[in-house]
Image: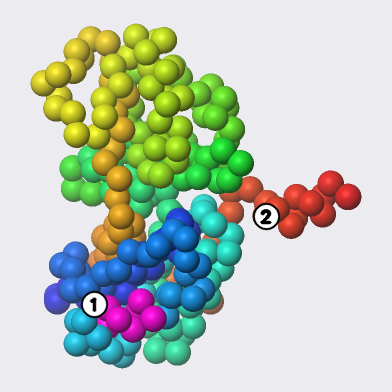
Amino acid sequence: MNAPIILSLDTATLGGSVWLGRGTSELAARSGDPKVSQSASLLQDINDILTEAKLTLADVELFACASGPGSFTGLRIGIATLKGLAASLERPCLGIPTLHAVAHAAGPSPATVALLPAGRGEVFAQLLSLSADGVVSELDTPAHLSPQKLLERYASRVDLKWAGAGAYLQRDLLASHAQEANIYFAEAMEHDAAVDKKRGVWSLASPETNLARHVAALALELFQTGDIQSPHSLSAIYVRPSDAELNQTCR
């Protein structure tokens, strides 16, 4: 069976990204500017990578996108775009939980806390594991947490990998707690040889600039097992209400 042509989108994170490949082999990719709304650039980015790969939308056999949590506006833009393309071309599509893609980008680990900024200094968080062959498993449920609640949730674990833009946002907090708890805090590029395993390790994964490639990799695994979605069934994962809904509740 030939690997399918996959077009994947990440509009859940700031800047976002698009990726085009045959299976896991990259043909073209773009990473967005966090200062520019993807509503202004997404369709152009898709057109650009198709042109670079000398393909058309009709060549795409599977569409995938990060389905949340993440930016409310970004998720709506990405999912609406994906559903429109998949429906018009009668192609299968898949929504991949954003935090799963973050954990996948961080590499194999028995325990990775995937973190994304949720505004106001808070984060979306979930504990996951990633096997050597790329299978993501959930160890708890995604949550919207304050920095203090984040520590309360995971402070008892002495061996963790922290991944995603939210981990860098909370880097000083994590490092400070690790020091207080006598846990070694390893930066992304440090070598295991420098770590005293007896103390436990909190490590910070290297940042990933194109999350869409990991969305595609996880979508491929599902596609190969026949676990696909129709455009109609694709929906966003929201861990907290939108600001508009919160404001309405407070009235």
Amino acid type indicated by mark 1: Ile
Examine the structure image and report whether residue 45 is included in the region drawn in magenta.
yes
Q: Which mark is residue 92?
A: none
Q: Is residue 99 above or below residue 200?
A: below
Q: Is residue 162 left or right of residue 251?
A: left
Q: Main secondary structure of the magenta part?
A: helix
Residue named by callout 1: 5
Q: Residue at x 55, y 46 (%)?
A: 118
Which image quarter holds the N terminus? bottom left
Report how far apart the C-alphas of labels 1 and 2 lie in the structure: 34 Å
The local secondary structure at tag 2 comes to: loop
Q: Quadrant of residue 176?
A: top left
Measured from the top left, where is residue 131 in percent x and y? 23, 41
Can residue 6 be seen here? The reply is no
Q: Is residue 86 above or below residue 124?
A: below
Please state the extent of the stretch shown in magenta in the rendering: 44-50
Dot 2: within a 10 Å radius of its alpha carbon, few (fewer than 14), some, or many (20 or more) residues?
Answer: few
Residue named by callout 2: 242
Q: Is residue 234 left or right of residue 190?
A: right
Can residue 36 be seen here? The reply is yes
Q: Residue at x 38, y 22 (%)?
A: 175
Measured from the top left, where is residue 130 in percent x and y? 28, 42
Q: Quadrant of residue 3?
A: bottom left
Q: Residue at x 44, y 59 (%)?
A: 34
The local secondary structure at tag 1 comes to: strand
